[in-house]
Image: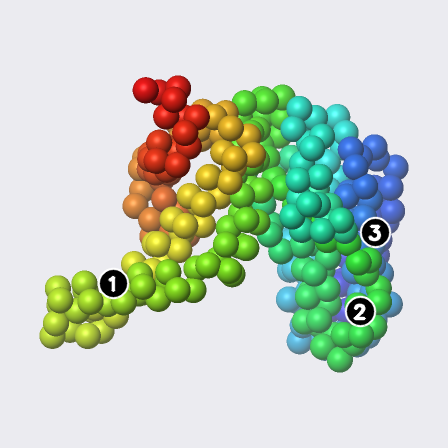
Amino acid sequence: MTRNKLYRRIIGLVDFINELDEYDYYNKASNIAIKNYRSLIQYLKENIDKVDAIHYSKLYRLLNTDIIPNIRYVQRAETKNIPWSLVSNLDEILKSELGSDCWLLFRPQWRFNYSVLTEDLITYLKNILYIFFPHDLETINKKFTDEKIHIFSFPFLEKTNVLLNSIIGHEIGHFYHVKWKQEYYCDLKENHNEILKEHYSTISPEDFIDAYENTEEGMNILDGMYREIISDIYGYCLFGPSVIFALFDLSEFEPKQLLPSKGNRYYPSIKYRIRILMDYLFEEDAGVNSVCL
């Protein structure tokens, strides 16, 4: 990888980002995102001579496989592509939880998937520059704005599906799960860990390594279950029963019910999540009980 090839790619990105200012976006999140992407690319352009030559290939791959696709997501977030049936109040919901400097950016994608990045975009962009310019931290920080942008992805083909798009409530629930994990999970995790250690050491008392590995895997499975199921519960609190029907609709696209494992990032199957959510509601929600009895 040569410096000139890397520089040409960066110059091309400068022109591409400048074109994005002409689009009509549904809120200021896209404009703020573009402004900060411009700061990233401009910094790379102005300081390319400070990048160690051994990092040229790494930076070039990062631009092609990560930065450019993500900028194209912002490009698609035009007013005409956004499910207005949902976005009107979501900004306010997150601002009340995360602060008035928080912005929501919806990005349509071709994959049939809903997801959220709980790390804000601007922190992510700063971290990229920290990698290549580790001695410029203070200068880098001054190049970016102070807002926080959280990115929600949804299937482009379902932009008008009001029912299915209520699954975004689950994605908002991930922020509440992060807060729950920080405030309440520590003691519970220790209890789980002790119970699993005792269980697996009883099953295989002469094989400590096997018991340890099973305990670690068990904790990973529990972490994945809490991550998704707690988010489901908060999603229900935000959007009501439509979340249950939306989850069931999504479950129809699961090829088969897979057990949580490292291979699927310890996701519990959607139908299992629905069953746990219903068990929780029957136990905790008087309104559900009054309707179903």
Counting labels gives: 3
Q: Earlier in the sequence, mark 2 or mark 3?
A: 3
Distance between the Cα atoms at labels 1 and 3? 49 Å
The residue labelled by disc 2 is 140
Q: Is residue 51 left or right of residue 279?
A: right
SS at circle 3: helix
Q: Amino acid at mark 3?
A: Lys
Depth check, front residue: 159 or 228: 228
**Which element is circle 1 on?**
helix
Q: Is residue 175 above or below residue 188?
A: above
Residue 63 x %, y %: 69, 57
Please say whether residue 180 is visible from this viewpoint. Answer: yes
Residue 273 as seen in the image, left or right of residue 3: left
Q: Nearer the viewer, residue 70 or 184?
A: 184
Please name which of the two marks, 1 or 3, marks the residue nearer to the observer.
1
The numbered mark, 2 or 1, whose residue comes first in the sequence reads 2
Kindly identify the amino acid type of the residue bearing the numbered disc 2.
Ile
Residue found 52% across the figure and 35% down from its top: 237
Check contact, mark 2 vs mark 3: CB within 8 A: no
Direction from residue 35 to residue 73 in the image, left or right = left
Q: Residues within 10 Å of mark 2 (few under 14, many from 20)?
A: some
* 49 w.r.t. 188: above or below: below
Q: Which residue is mark 1?
A: 196
Residue at the image position 66 percent from the left and 40 percent from the top: 93
State how far apart marks 2 and 3 are (Cα).
Answer: 14 Å
User: In x, y percent, where is residue 138?
Assistant: 80, 74
Q: For mark 3, what is the residue?
A: 35
As drawn, 189 above or below 172: below
Q: Residues within 10 Å of mark 1 (few under 14, many from 20)?
A: many
Tag 2, which secondary structure? helix
